[in-house]
Image: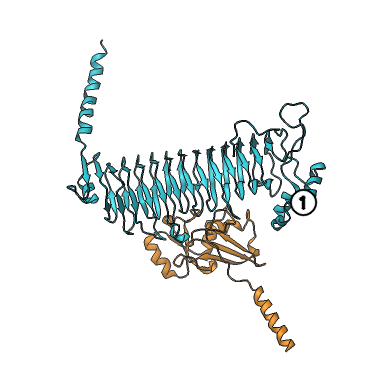
Amino acid sequence: MNRLPALRSLVAPLLVLWATGPLSARTWTVGADGPSKKLGVAIASASAHDTIRVLEGTYAEGNITVDKPITLLGIGKPLIDGGGKGDVLMITAPDVTVQGFRITGTRISSLNDFAGIQVVKADRVHIADNEFVNCFFAMHFSECRDMLVERNNIHGDPTLADNDRANGIHLWHCTRAMIQGNTITDHRDGIYFEFVTDSHIEHNTSLRNIRYGLHFMFSHRDKYTDNLFMHNGAGVAVMYSKNVDMHRNRFISNRGASAYGLLLKEINDVTIDSNLFVDNTTALLVDGCNRMEAKGNMFGSNGWAIRLFSNATACTFTRNTFTGNTFDLATNGNPEYNKFSGNYWDRYKGYDLNRDGTGDVPFRPLSLFAMVNERMPYAVVLSRSLLTGLLDQAERLIPSMTPEGLEDDKPLMKPPHGTRKL
Amino acid sequence: MKEMLITAALVFMAAGCTVGQPKIKYGADECAHCRMNVVDAKFAAAIQTTKGRDYVFDAPECMVPFTGRNGHLVKEEVAHWYVTDFAHPGTLIDATKAFYLHAPALKSPMRGNVAAFATDADRQAAKKLFPGDDLDWQGVQKLFTDE
């Protein structure tokens, strides 16, 4: 009982806060028939923590700046048209919510990064359920923290020249971002993280972007899971970053001479777990990586499943499934200190006399023809010919040319449990 | 008549052998150094070797480290250095004679943030938008050489 006065002294001001906080926030309505017709005017007259309901209609007011913590709520997907004057919405205040709009009319510029929603040095911004139509950048965040970007549909203009399109969701010097459930098509990079730390990218779909579906540069301690990347010009690139986790993503049909399902360049300490790589020219390219762990991934019907450069060290591959790839592995030299163990290879012709589930003779995933082809790319015309078949068969019987270290000591007889089906 | 035909054929063959300026296929070419696809026509760079082979880069900060101590080529193998005239995206100019601006706001692909210009006047005009420092080719090489 003697604790009660102390508690009461705490509760009383809290009660006051609770009573005054929400009550003091007002709700404004903007619409063609409403008291207020202009969104910009409503924002100017609103106070912090107010909500502005925007009714169906078109709001073409040039650049609109949101400089106080308010909520903009679109009812019936109202259209905000920037009219090609620059950014459409510019957010400079924290705790702003923008939900339920259609946004279009950014200016295309080779000098400035104009965006449908431009967020500058504002924390805890929430962008949800919007549609971005033919924007240059759809969303551009610089120096922001704790933003939530969810369920937006972002579509660039596929008829524009490559140079007139920019990224869908672009983050620069941000931290603790959550990007989830968005769909991005026909931009330059779908999602671009530059100097972004401690962030998550989940359940997004990135299609037909000119360059990368997802692009990481200098971004550490990030995680991306359950995303779909398909038909992007160059696939997905994770570069110059460390501590990146990639789980349960699908990398599908990224085809071209310099297209990769997943391109890893100068990456340290990454986990690639339970992803699906199908129908890519190169599913996974590993260039200059240390301590990468690839497990439980499915590589099916790719040109090259893995291209492991000789500058990769301490990379491990376990419980992955390789089926129907033209080359399971290629390398430009002799990568050392990497480990393949317990993967399933459809090319494995060994046997399992002791019936422990793993083959009794090791498997060398690097075929002799893959090595020849790495030196002479034009030799690929001989692919699947009798000659290369004989070469590979000879090498399999008496291994002499392929690097010794690159072998799976315990190849699985059946695809591992838990790997995704095609 | 026969001699004329042969001469003409020879001339055509010789013409076929000349190496022109490298052509960059924006969106399709891969940077020889960082492997990123070259899309930004304001910053692309290129090297032509003495043997006539072209290497394409997404920006000067990738071209310079490609040569030198830890690089792929040595400087003696380079016949021509090209950078893009920032004022005229898509136009390659001689890197050794270009005027450079180093400004953080430029945001080049690999964040070396150096733009090249064919004339000093263009550079000074850009400097109003992107405040920064003037550099020459020597300065750019120094800036991007790994120690």
Q: Secondary structure at mark 1?
A: helix
Residue shown at 44% from the left, 66% from the top: B87
Quadrant of res A407: top right
Total number of numbered discs in the rendering? 1
Q: Nearer the viewer, residue A328 or B72?
A: A328
**Is residue A314 in view?**
no
Vertical placement of A125 versus A157: above or below?
Answer: above
Residue shown at 54% from the left, 49% from the top: A235
Is B87 placed left or right of A90 in the picture?
Answer: right
**Is residue A393 in view?**
yes
Coloring basis for residues = by chain
What shade has chain A been given? cyan
Query: Chain ID for label 1?
Result: A
Q: Position of residue A264 (x, y in %)?
A: 58, 46
Vertical placement of B136 versus A106: above or below?
Answer: below
Residue at the bottom extreme of this rendering: B1
Q: Which residue, given by chain and number where applicable, does mark 1 sit on?
A: A388
Q: Amino acid at mark 1?
A: Thr
**Mark 1 nearby-residue class (10 Å; few <14, some 14–19, many ≥20):** some
Q: Nearer the viewer, residue A25 or B95?
A: A25
Q: Nearer the viewer, residue B139 or B51?
A: B51
Is A137 placed left or right of A258 in the picture?
Answer: left
Q: Quadrant of the N terminus of chain A?
A: top left
Vertical placement of B99 versus B33: above or below?
Answer: below
Q: Position of residue B27 (x, y in %)?
A: 52, 58
Residue at the top extreme of this rendering: A1
What shade has chain B been given? orange
Residue at the left extreme of this rendering: A35
Q: Position of residue A17 (x, y in %)?
A: 22, 29
Q: Position of residue A74 (x, y in %)?
A: 29, 44
Q: Nearer the viewer, residue A259 or A381?
A: A381
